[in-house]
């Protein structure tokens, strides 16, 4: 053993923690891809002309937003198999995170769409735009200015909440920290390093989302 | 021993008292510490402001679960023997103080600059300007988002089950191990959380609407 104790410690256990961090990134990346699309669909459902559709989406949004993520995760991982097929831990984690993020996403997208003045739609229609290009080229880019900051914050919050999936043995950053601390009996040090990695991840994730949004929707969104 | 549906429900409802007690303790602690953080966050001293901003960003940028672990394993290093209840209260207090300070800062900054100037013109020292002129006005704006945050706080209490505090979710785990009825147990657990949180959400929304009308 040479050098500073901290450096040696990181050399011994850093790889395990970083491999956990990679899983955490994978979880939030897959969840974000699913949730963004589903949130737009859900927001459309909430503005649907069918009352039952509005009510169903509203019920889903309220149920998820008013219960803890960890309880949703346990219900999906431990409770659902008694109805149907058994879910693997990773699949259950993705499902729970997607169900959770989508509920917040629907409200965020809906608020964004509501913020676009009706005159914009009328003007686009007067110019003879089709419904699809009206939505994609007129409404969505303007709504994104409202949607993006809120959605980015919610994605970061979901990434931080994903620490909970370690309790169903998904090998994320927190799970790896659990393993390291049970091997070294240095719980505080291990969790401190893991916490700092989460802090860095949340800063990087925010940057990556800004970058992605300005690539997709042009400057001034991120 | 055979558990009926009513046994499960009764035990979960008894455990809900601990969830409520923890949320109240976290809110009281978080409110007190949060007020102190707020005063530092809006202080004249630049270094103090930066320190408070970093405090807030640290708690908002890291998982609450890890914060609870750090409190649970960190306090014994300081020679304090902590129970899961004490660790849970300290952890939630620290986390809630960061969120509340940030919410209240928004409310304070919504008060026009002229109010500070007018209070200064009356010869009030800085902390009395805040206490007598700014905070009473900011309070009105802050009520709705503060009630909204209380929903998040109730949901956060579920994480303390991981460090061994026997609140609603942990009791659910124990009952599941005894009954092998995870669908019923976690379904009920989720519904009880909903019954706690949804009225708070509705109340926050009403307050918001009332404020919008002026």
Image (cartoon, coloured by chain):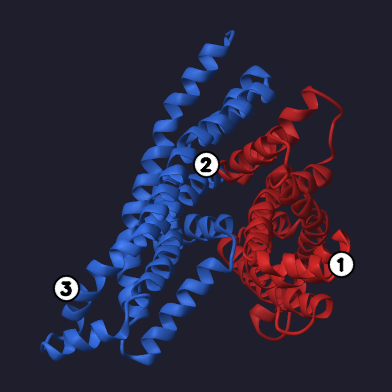
Q: Tell us which disc is closer to us: 3 or 2.
A: 3
Q: Position of residue A4 (x, y in %)?
A: 66, 84
Number of the label disc, if any, that sits on residue B132: 3
- Residue B123, image quadrant: bottom left
Question: What is the drawing colour of chain B?
Answer: blue
Q: Position of residue A164 (x, y in %)?
A: 65, 50
Give the Cα separation between the discs numbered 1 and 2: 59 Å
Q: Classify residue B51 as left or right of residue A146.
A: left
Q: Position of residue B86 (x, y in %)?
A: 39, 49
The relative height of residue A212 versus residue A185 in the rendered view (above or below) is below
Q: The disc numbered 2 marks a residue on which chain?
A: B
Give the Cα separation between the discs numbered 3 and 2: 43 Å
Query: Which residue is label 1 attached to?
Result: A129
Residue at x 68%, y 25% (from the top left corner): B182
Q: Residue furthest front?
A: A126
The relative height of residue A30 versus residue B162 in the rendered view (above or below) is below
Q: Position of residue A217 (x, y in %)?
A: 80, 76
**Front one among B179 and A184:** B179
Number of the label disc, if any, that sits on residue B164: 2
Do residues under tags 1 and 2 come within 8 Å of each other at their CB atoms? no
Give the Cα separation between the discs numbered 1 and 3: 57 Å
Pointers 3 and 2 within a single chain: yes
Q: Does dot 2 land on a helix, a strand or a loop?
A: loop
Question: What is the drawing colour of chain A?
Answer: red
Pointers 1 and 2 within a single chain: no
């Amino acid at each position: 053993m040479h050098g500073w104790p901290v450096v040696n410690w990181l050399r011994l256990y850093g790889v395990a923690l970083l491999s956990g961090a990679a899983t955490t990134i994978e979880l939030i990346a897959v969840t974000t891809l699913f949730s963004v699309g589903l949130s737009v669909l859900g927001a459309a459902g909430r503005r649907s002309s069918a009352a039952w559709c509005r009510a169903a989406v509203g019920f889903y949004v309220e149920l998820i937003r008013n219960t803890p993520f960890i309880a949703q995760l346990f219900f999906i991982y431990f409770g659902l198999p008694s109805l149907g097929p058994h879910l693997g831990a990773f699949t259950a984690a993705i499902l729970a995170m997607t169900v959770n993020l989508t509920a917040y996403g629907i409200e965020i997208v809906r608020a964004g769409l509501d913020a676009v003045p009706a005159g914009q739609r009328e003007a686009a229609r007067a110019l003879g735009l089709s419904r699809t290009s009206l939505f994609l080229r007129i409404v969505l880019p303007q709504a994104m200015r409202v949607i993006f900051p809120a959605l980015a914050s919610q994605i970061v919050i979901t990434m931080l909440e994903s620490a909970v999936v370690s309790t169903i043995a998904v090998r994320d950053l927190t799970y790896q920290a659990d393993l390291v601390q049970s091997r070294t009996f240095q719980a505080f040090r291990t969790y401190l390093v893991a916490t700092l990695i989460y802090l860095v991840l949340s800063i990087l994730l925010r940057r990556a989302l800004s970058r992605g949004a300005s690539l997709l929707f042009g400057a001034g969104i991120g | 021993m055979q558990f009926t549906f009513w046994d499960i429900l009764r035990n979960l409802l008894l455990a809900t008292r601990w969830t409520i007690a923890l949320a109240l303790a976290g809110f009281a602690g978080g409110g007190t510490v949060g007020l102190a953080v707020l005063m530092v966050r809006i202080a004249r001293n630049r270094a103090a402001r930066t320190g408070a901003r970093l405090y807030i960003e640290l708690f908002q940028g890291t998982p609450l679960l890890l914060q609870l672990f750090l409190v649970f394993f960190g306090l014994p290093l300081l020679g304090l023997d902590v129970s899961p209840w004490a660790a849970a209260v300290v952890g939630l207090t620290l986390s809630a103080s960061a969120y509340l300070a940030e919410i209240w800062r928004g409310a304070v900054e919504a008060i026009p600059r002229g109010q500070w100037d007018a209070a200064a013109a009356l010869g009030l020292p800085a902390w009395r300007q805040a206490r007598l002129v700014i905070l009473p006005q900011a309070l009105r704006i802050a009520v709705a988002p503060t009630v909204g945050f209380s929903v998040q706080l109730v949901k956060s209490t579920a994480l303390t089950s991981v460090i061994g505090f026997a609140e609603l979710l942990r009791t659910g785990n124990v009952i599941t191990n005894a009954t092998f009825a995870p669908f019923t147990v976690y379904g009920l657990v989720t519904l009880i959380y909903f019954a706690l949180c949804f009225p708070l959400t509705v109340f926050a929304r009403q307050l918001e609407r009332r404020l919008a009308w002026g």
